[in-house]
Amino acid sequence: MKYLLFAFTAILLDVASCGSRHDYDDELNVSSSRVILESQKGASSELFVSSDLHWDITVYGEWLHVSPSSGNSDAKIVVTALSSNESPYERSCTIIISGGPIQREVIVIQRGKVSVNDKEDGT
């Protein structure tokens, strides 16, 4: 009788835990959390997405373009500056890559323009 009660309890616990067990793990990985672009218009860099989910990219910056902006698996993403940064200071924006419940944030920095005086002074 004790054996039957033990077996029934073990089966009941196994069945109860099945609802929280996953046979797979969703994956959404990005090769870098930071991208640095030179100051000129058209400056570009690459990111790599590794995923088994459908993903979309949202860009939070008017001066930046990404291609492709969505996908269903692994992909190379090209990040391109749509305008030059005429300021001597760097600027930044964020892109979010979302797939299912997973989100990855990438900070994109565009360097500031170096003036002729800065080059001569060595700064």
Image (tube, rainbow, N blue to C red):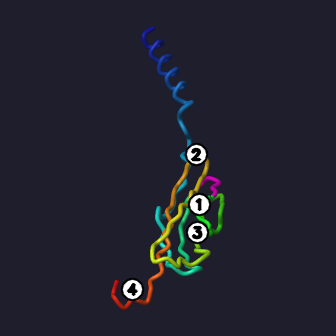
Please tell me whether residue 108 is drawn above or below residue 9 in the rendered image.
Answer: below
Lower position in the chain sequence, tag 1 or tag 2: 1
What secondary structure is found at the residue carrying circle 2?
Answer: loop
Lower position in the chain sequence, tag 4 or tag 2: 2
What secondary structure is found at the residue carrying circle 3?
Answer: strand
Residue 45 percent across, percent down from the top left = 53, 74
Please tell me whether residue 111 is drawn above or below residue 27 in the rendered image.
Answer: below
Q: Three-letter amino acid code at disc 1?
A: Tyr
Tell which tag, 1 or 2, sits nearer the viewer: 1
Q: Nearer the viewer, residue 97 or 115?
A: 115
Q: Mark 2 points at which residue?
A: 101
Q: Mark 1 points at which residue?
A: 60
How packed mark 3 is, by other alpha carbons closer than 10 Å (few <14, some 14-19, many 20 or more), is some
Q: In which quarter of the image is residue 23?
A: top right
Q: Nearer the viewer, residue 66 or 22?
A: 66
Which region of the structure is painted magenta? 51-56
Answer yes or no: do the residues labelled 4 and 1 have beta carbons within 8 Å?
Answer: no
Residue 59 is covered by the magenta coloring: no
Q: What's the mark number on residue 76?
A: 3
Q: Mark 4 points at which residue?
A: 118
Spatial CA distance of label 4 from label 1 is 30 Å
Q: Is residue 88 left or right of residue 55?
A: left
Q: Three-letter amino acid code at disc 3?
A: Lys
Image quarter in which the C terminus is found = bottom left
